[in-house]
Amino acid sequence: MPDGQTLTARLYERGQAKDGRWLFDVGLVVWRNGPKREHAEPAEYRVWIPAEQARRVNGADYSQVKTTRRQPPAPKPWPRPRPADRWKVEVVRRQPATDFQWVTVHRADCSLGAGGEEIDDEQKARERMAAEGGRGCAACGTDMSLRTAPDADSGR
């Protein structure tokens, strides 16, 4: 209490608020007047209080008290990048004495793409990535976005 008094209450439930703070549903026995105000009788006053306003009672067992934890909010999905309309094909490594190349296909605006041939046709970018030695860039998402041809039925 503000003036230093302490009250003993019954703990009914512990609950977590939206902001993560804990609240306790407690019942305090107080006096109230009877129907004709001729006598006083005990009555329970129930209220949710902030956990920091409560103290444990020594020796009390709280294991059976209902405890309601809030589920953490679902993580927000990663923002989807705008669809690419140009790609870069970076030659990562050439196989000695052959025409074979290891290449990575990047979006044209990918900071990891170190130059290379620019392509403005999605099908050609898919073909370069699908060819032997080709791969997409995990940083800019071409490893997923160019993996398969769009599904004609779904419009993707």
Image (cartoon, helix red, strand yellow):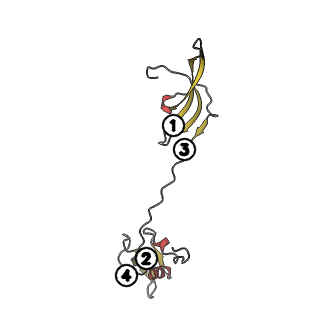
Please name the residue that numbered disc 3 is placed on.
Answer: 70
Mark 4 and mark 3 residues within 8 Å of each other at the beta carbon:
no
Given residues 97 and 130, the one toward you in this image is 130
Which picture quadrant has residue 15? top right
Amino acid beneath label 3: Arg
Tell me which label, 2 or 4, sits earlier in the chain: 2
Query: Circle 4 sits in a helix, a strand or a loop, which is it?
Result: strand
Please name the residue that numbered disc 2 is placed on.
Answer: 105
Camera sees residue 26: yes
Measure the C-alpha gap from mark 2 to mark 4. 10 Å
Given residues 139 and 23, the one toward you in this image is 23
Q: Whole-percent x and y of residue 45? A: 56, 25
Mark 4 and mark 1 residues within 8 Å of each other at the beta carbon:
no
Q: Nearer the viewer, mark 4 or mark 3?
A: 3
Amino acid beneath label 4: Glu
Please name the residue that numbered disc 4 is placed on.
Answer: 117
Q: Is residue 79 above or below residue 69?
A: below
Tell me which label, 3 or 2, sits earlier in the chain: 3
The residue most toward the top is 38
Q: Is residue 130 above or below residue 71?
A: below
Q: Whole-percent x and y of residue 46? A: 56, 28
Q: Nearer the viewer, mark 3 or mark 2?
A: 3
Query: Circle 1 sits in a helix, a strand or a loop, which is it?
Result: strand
Q: Residue at x 62, y 29 (%)?
A: 61
Please name the residue that numbered disc 1 is placed on.
Answer: 22
Measure the C-alpha gap from mark 2 to mark 1. 51 Å
Query: Circle 3 sits in a helix, a strand or a loop, which is it?
Result: loop
